[in-house]
Image: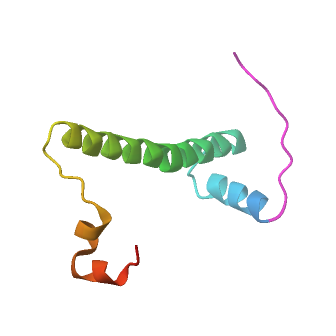
Amino acid sequence: MDDKMNVTLRGKVREILDDMVEEGYANTKSEAIRLAILNFGEEHIGEELMVKEKLDKIDKGIKEGKRKVLGYKEALGVYAKHIKG
């Protein structure tokens, strides 16, 4: 499916787009926009995936008994005495 759109860019965004083409990062403005979207996806969506994978690994370790879950008093150690309750 090929969605076409017209986008008007002004100001700093337009300057960055023009610079991407002038500096050779992209051959066309359309390509520059695609690169920017891909970069955003890799940076933000990729980061979310890494966090999810890490949390899944921690959960698995807990279920398998390889990691210990601490209560707040254990986690705080000597500082637990400062918590009321």
Q: Quadrant of residue 60?
A: top left
- 38 in magenta: no
Q: How is the image coloured?
A: rainbow
- 5 in magenta: yes
- Please give the name of the residue rendered at 57% of the width and 48% of the height, measured from the top-left corner: 40
Q: Quadrant of residue 82?
A: bottom left
How many tags in the picture? 0
Look at the image and tell me in which quarter the N terminus lies.
Answer: top right
Outermost residue to the left: 66
Nearest the eye: 3 or 20: 3
- Please give the name of the residue rendered at 32% of the width and 39% of the height, measured from the top-left corner: 56
Outermost residue to the front: 85
Q: Main secondary structure of the magenta part?
A: loop
- Residue 11 in picture, x, y percent from top left: 82, 64
Residue 27 appears in the rendering: no
In the image, is 42 to the left or to the right of 59? right
Image position of 4 with respect to 83: above or below: above
Image position of 77 with respect to 11: above or below: below
Which region is colored magenta?
Answer: 1-11
Q: Quadrant of residue 83?
A: bottom left
Residue 5 appears in the rendering: yes
In the image, is 83 to the left or to the right of 31? left
Nearest the eye: 75 or 15: 75
- Please give the name of the residue rendered at 46% of the width and 46% of the height, measured from the top-left corner: 48
Nearest the eye: 63 or 14: 63
Look at the image and tell me in which quarter the C terminus lies.
Answer: bottom left
- Residue 46 in picture, x, y percent from top left: 45, 44
- Residue 73 in picture, x, y percent from top left: 27, 69
- Please give the name of the residue rendered at 31% of the width and 46% of the height, measured from the top-left corner: 54
- Residue 4 in picture, x, y percent from top left: 79, 27
